Structure formats: structure tokens, C-alpha cells
Amino acid sequence: MAPPQGQMRPGRQLAVLGFIFVVLYLLVFFSGGASGGWKDRLEPRLGLDLVGGTRLTLEATNTVDGKPPTADNLEEARQIIESRVNAYGVAEAEVVTEGNRNIVISLPGQNRDLTDVGEAAELRFRKVLKATDGSGAALAPAPTPSATPSGAATPSGSASPKASTSPKVSGSPSAGGQGGMASTPSASASATPSASPSAAAPSPSASAEPVPQSIEQQRKAVEQKVGAAAWAAASGLQAPADLTTDPSLADKLKPFGTLTPQEIAVLPVEMQFNVPTITCAQLDKRPAASIKDEKQKAVACESGAKYLLDVAKVLGTDVKNASAQLDQTSSWVVSLNFTGSGQEKWTALTREAFTNEGQACDQTALGQDGKCRVAVVLDNEIVSSPEIQGVLTGDSQITGSFDNKAANALASQLRYGALPVTFEPQEQQNVTATLGDSHLKAGLLAAGIGMLLVIIYSFFYYRLLGSVIFLSLVLSALLVFGALVVLGRSIGFTLTLAGIAGMIVSLGVAADSFVIYFERLKDEIREGRSPRSAVPRAWIRARRTIISANAITLMSAVVLYIVSVGAVKGFAFALGLATVLDLVVVFLFRHPIMTMFARTRAFLSPRVSGLGRALPARSAEPGTARNPRVKEA
């Protein structure tokens, strides 16, 4: 015969709960990432406000008009920066926007330089059209007209993901292309200030670039600063000036050596290249995104040599994937995998450089074997400028003196794309562990006081039933704690002060479900049922309300988690996690343990059970009929 409705076997639910605890804490102590002593394995990941760490503020800049970026661009930049930080193996990082131009990065638990994650990472592949000295050595009197970059040349600035030595780009062994790419040993091999008449560059006025009004105004300001004579002399240059043949020209162009990198950035490209008093020391310090436009020529430096670069034929968006790898010599390289259209562009560019179509590359820019070079330009700097020794039809590599960190940093920037906004680091501060420890103690104290007040009230009002509340809260806390440890290792969840607040709020949700169940139980007993039969009936009716209340809390937490960022997201996650685990405790512990209590004699005593006047009201008139009031549906 089937058991009566409501009858259950509480041992099964308790066994399931015990199994969940065993599995959870096996993961806590022995899952991947668990290391150290037993105490270390019980430590969850804590946020910046609890353990200290690093906070970096990046301010969006715009070299053209100074206006703040759009909200969409700022959000896109935030997502890219967050992906870069996570790709570095930095867990629990918090990346949020602040105001209309700031992005704040918080890294808990360690002090680390995060300024490189805000670099634009605009990757461009450009042919080297011409080369000249950019070290400033040609400004000094010399016995011969030749001026090659010397060892005293001002080295070009290096981005953090680059190596100190100039790397090169080469075809991967599996590329299947014809030939390869070889790096020119040094810039002095081909960079000379003398220009042949046949390779004369067009004058700036003949190829004036359409520029925004603000840049045109800035150029006029620079013209006034250097003077009309210097500006006219620079505008009339058709090629890099040879100051040894015309010493008076050096005095005319001398004012350009006093310009700031910001002022250099607004000059026409040909003027930046042809004026010898504009050195690599100035060009390397130009603001970010100064040579961003792929449709215009550009000037950049490498090892003291100044290059005139062609328009970009291959962009960073043509790179499908970038990864840091060890090559056959156990050296770190960045492997580039192109998209379908990107591979076609790359093959066309290497063919064009290999054959020197239209003799576009000047003699000063050719490599040792007389082939054109292709510069790999990252932001404003040349990563390498290898000579093209064949047509490449497959993937390529950026190689050089990379270490693991530098190679992964560059690959991360290229893989997640260029930032739509340029940033300048404004403030990087370290939060001390002492302050974080005080926050942690305050949060735990608040949680302890909240739980203690709930327990005191439950024992005062419900007495024996208060022990059910106490045990339920303890089990729920153990489940939440174990889940925090496991989630911290698996998905990088970080417990913050806001997360502790979410768990404190969940105590109120748990206490509310107790009140619903116990008051429903009292109503059933007042209607004349025995405690043993009242427990399952009260559970059936209270269960709907408990599920509905927790479902609303859970949906609120999910919505809050989706639409929020930063600390609020941590609050929502902790609240939702605690709510789900409270439901587990309700179904697998609270109802089964109440069924077991209903079979004891203590449960029949109002002083012990905490059922108040419900039991005396029934036992005072044993012969009377049950309360005829209408029952709830």
C-alpha cells in the first residue's frame, strides 16, 4: 500500500545533504588549485578592500579635439582592458568605468604595474619607404657628408610588452610560403641622411593631408612658435636635409628641435621626416595614437634611425589570433594567425615588398639583400622592420628577446584588439593589507552579530524549534563557505566587503522562511491536528510561499548582477549564492529534521517545542470538535 500523503523518510534527504557536504569539502581540500597546509586550503579569495592590492586609474585622452569619448567607446575599452588583465593570469581583477573618461582597475592581493593594459595596441604593417638619421648626430659638424646612426643615438622608447632588442617577424615553419623574412642587423646599414634626387619626397604642400580644424589650428600655433623663416625652409624640403652642404640651413631649422612631442605630432608627415632637427627622442614621445590613421603615411624610429612608412596594408584587425609560444630554439615568440582576408592582404604586402613594385622603396630603406622591409608598428613604435626575402602565404611570428611575461603581454594586446580610446595613467595606488584586514574583521563581526541576534531571537521565541534554526544557519554557512573556496579557485570569484553584505542580507531571507514554516505549523495545530500530522501539511502549504520568496530574491540578484559592475556585482552574486544554498538546506535538512522532531515527546510540550498556546488550546478541550474555520486552499 502506498504511504499516506505527506509521509516521508527524512533519512534519505539527510543522506543526500551529507553527500553534498562530502563532495563539496573534498573539492575544497583536494581540487585543482588546492595547495599548502589545511589552513591555506580553507582560505577563499578575498577582494582588494579586504586584503589590500593595487588600484590604477586610466584617463581617456584625445589628441585631436580633447573631447571625452562616447559611452560606447568607453565601455568597449573597459571590456578589452578587462580581457587583457584576465589574460595575464590576474584573477579577481575589477575593471569599472568612472565618470565620462576614467577607467579604474583594481587588483586585490598583490602589487603590480598595470599601466601596460591601457596601451592602445594599434598594430600596423607598413613598408619602409625611406630611412634617414634620427639621432641628431648629423647636426654636429662632420668631416664627411655621410651621417649614419651612431652608437650614441637616442634609442627609441619601448613599450612594455616589447623586448629591449629589436625583434623580427618571420614566417612560421608551417606557413607553406615562399621564402621568409629576415631582420636587418642594424639601422646603420641602410639609414643615411643623404637622399638621392630620384627618390625625392613630394613637398608637404603638394600632398597636404586633410586634417581636422583643431589640428590645423595647432599647426598654425607651431608655425608661429618656430617662425616664418624656419617653417618656410622646412616646407621647401623635398628630401631629408643635408646640413653639411648648407650650414645656414641648420640655423633655420634649429627651432624645430625645441618643439614638444605633442607639437611634433601635428606636423605634416614629410616635415617630420625631412627636418633633421626633429629627432627620434621627440618622435618616440609623441602622444598615443599619433600615427593611428592607416590611410596616411607615418614617421617612426627604430634604433636611432628615422623611417618614412607607407600606408598600412595590413592591420591588427586582420590578425585572427596571437599567442605566446616557444620556438625550436626555446625562445619566446608571438605567433600571428591571420584571418582569411587578412592572409590575402599579408601575402600581397610581402609580394609587393619582395619585388619592390614601382620602386617605392628608396635605396636608403632596402635591406642587405636589396629587398624592401616591412615595419611592424605597435602604437607609435616600430617593433621590428625585417627585410622581406620571399612571399609569405601563411602565418608569421614576431620574434626577439622576449621573456614569458613580455610575450604573453603583447599577444594579449593583439588578441583582444586595439582600444578604441587612448589612455594615460593618472594614478596607481596600493591599498595596504592592514586596512584590508580591518575591513575584513568589521565585515565578519557584522555577519556574526547578525547571525547571533537571529539565533537569540529564535531560541527565545521558538525554543526547541530554535535549535532547528541554529543548525540550519550553521549548515548554510558551511555550504556558502565551501562554495566560496571552490568558486574562487574555479572561476576566480572574489569575496569583497559588498559580498559579505549580500550574505548578511541573505540571513534575513533565511529567517523569513523559518517564520513562514513555523507559523503555518501553529495554524495547523490550532485547527485540531496532531503535531505529527501538522508537520507535513504545514510543509506543503508553506513550501509554496518559501519557494516564491526565494525565487524573487534570486531573480533580483540575477538582474542586479547582469546590469551592475564592480562591488555591486559581488553583492548580487553573494546574495544569489546564499539564497540558492538556503533552499538546499530548507529541502534537505529543515523539513526532514522537523519530521523527526514531530515524533518525539518534547515536541508535544509547548514549553519545550516553542509552539506556544497552540498545543494547550487543543488539549484543553479534548472532546470538542476541531475549529470549523475555513482552511486555506
Image (cartoon, helix red, strand yellow):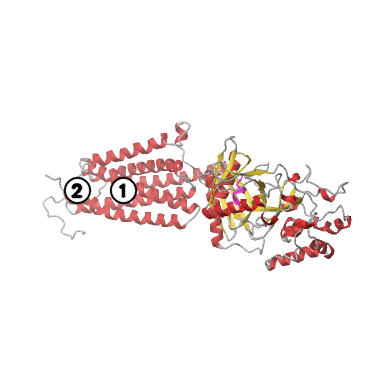
Q: Position of residue 371 (x, y in %)?
A: 68, 48
The residue lying furthest to the top in this view is 37
Label 2 secondary element = loop
* Kind of residue at badge 1: Tyr
Q: Residues within 10 Å of mark 2 (few under 14, many from 20)?
A: few
Residue picked out by circle 1:
461
Q: Which residues are magenta?
A: 113-121
Judging depth in this view, the residue of 583 and 489 nearest the camera is 489
Judging depth in this view, the residue of 305 and 503 nearest the camera is 305
Q: Name the image quarter holding residue 221.
A: bottom right
* Vertical order, 395 against 264 (above or below): above
Residue picked out by circle 2:
6
**Cα–Cα span, label 1 and label 2:** 27 Å
* Kind of residue at badge 2: Gly
Q: Position of residue 543 (x, y in %)?
A: 27, 52
* Vertical order, 172 against 233 (above or below): above
Q: Can residue 80 be found in the magenta stretch?
A: no
